Image (cartoon, rainbow, N blue to C red):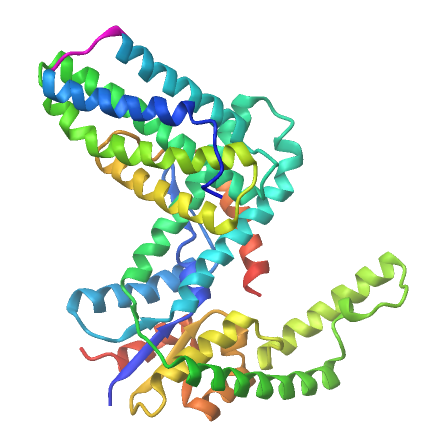
Amino acid sequence: MTCKIYVETTVIVCSSLGVKIGGKQVKHDKYDTTYNFLLYAERGYEKGTDSFYTTSTAVIESQRVLEIALNTMLENQLPSLSRKNIQRRRQAADTFYELLNDCLDQMEIWVSYLKQETFDSRKKDEMINTLREEFRKLDVDFRSEYGAEIDDFHFNLRRSVRGVAKAVRTIQHREAYKTYKPKPGRADIEIMAEVAAINSGCPDDIYIVGEDGHFCAEKNRALLERLFKIKCRYSTEMLDGLIRSLLPS
Amino acid sequence: MCASKIDDSVVLLARALRSDLAEFISNKKIDEEKVQRYDAVLKILETRRNYWALNRELPPIDSIKIYGAYSTVYGTLCGVAHALNEGIQRKENPKAAKDVYSIVSSAIELLPKLEIVHRDKQAPSQFIADIFDSSRALRKQAISQQLIQAGEKPDRIELIKELRTELEEQLS
């Protein structure tokens, strides 16, 4: 039995954010693991083995996430930057533009090593409905155990009290997220459904590799394995010997 | 959107510049008028660049894309001027002009769309995304022909650190 490894948005994004400037490397915290993991995809591509895949939604989402992050950064910096003289404004604009291009160039290279397949759109829609329903049930269980997010409350708390409560709740949730990460986004559900639709009835071992708890937290991965026999793993888990056992030679 | 009229002076000038280049390839003659036209296009493009540097009329990321596209066209035309100059000095014209004709055409084809955004100060995201894709293709072509350089900027270290934090937010 062969295996198919699907790469999810977070791996593509994290592995694209790393540059060498003046001999010093600046990168995302997860750059090294995701980069090393995708090197297997590069080697696989060079050898012509069909093991590494992604989906159209994962690719579109990767660029969108990167652009949203850059847009937020710019929004934060614009009030001070737009008061500078034209020389400084142009320098800053050049830097942002170069940064966007560098990240996208790297992203395009990684994506070029990953195969993309077509899928039955109706089948995908059915799977989206199934996934939404199943995640809704898990979300209800999560809320009953840990309470609602602090942002969901509308009563009047003094700001400082609210801040402390939010910090405490965030730490609690961060721990809890290792077990289950609630509220998967639209794109997450679509990627799961696309992989499931492409591989329904496929005898191969199917993996999704990501850095996102919506795929890889304990209960999230258990759900995908139960529904579609898809195994979700973090890239560190793949690098920890698993990938060598999965890939031929 | 494209049906409405734009201030097409720069578009027409740039198209004339392309004809000048074609003429130069065929009859190997360059005159004062052609050089002035080239300068005029570069001057307008520089004004546009300055206008879109961290401009707040569009969402910041879209402004950067428009700025980048104007910069790429400007940088490419500057690189072309330099390449033509060197060609003349080496007496290798019109070979040098033939080498850059295709990239000059690509750069000039980007201008009408850019001018629409510049006139309206707004555009659908898809329209800007198309401009961005074309400008990235032009940039790659210009870098491979060594007409522009992908510069290394020291203050990108801080930017990447900040981008990492923003990405964490997005990805969670």
Q: Position of residue A131 (x, y in %)?
A: 53, 85
- Determine whether A8 is above or below B138 in the image: below
Q: Position of residue A70 (x, y in %)?
A: 53, 48
| Magenta stretch contains residue A208 | no
Give the camera-side residue of A125 and B20: B20
Q: Is residue B154 visible?
A: no
Indicate left or right for A67 with A118 as reference. Answer: right
Indicate left or right for B84 with A152 as reference. Answer: left
Residue occupying image coordinates x 43% and y 52%: A17
Q: Is residue B72 visible?
A: yes
Residue occupying image coordinates x 30% and y 26%: B15
Indicate left or right for A188 with A246 as reference. Answer: right
Q: How many marks?
A: 0
Indicate left or right for A109 with A157 as reference. Answer: left
Point out the stretch of residues depicted in magenta.
Answer: B28-32
Give the camera-side residue of A154 and B124: B124
Give the camera-side residue of A115 and A244: A115
Please name the predominant secondary structure of the magenta segment in the image: loop
Q: Position of residue A92 (x, y in %)?
A: 52, 32
| Magenta stretch contains residue B30 | yes
Residue occupying image coordinates x 32% and y 38%: B139
Q: Position of residue A136 (x, y in %)?
A: 63, 84
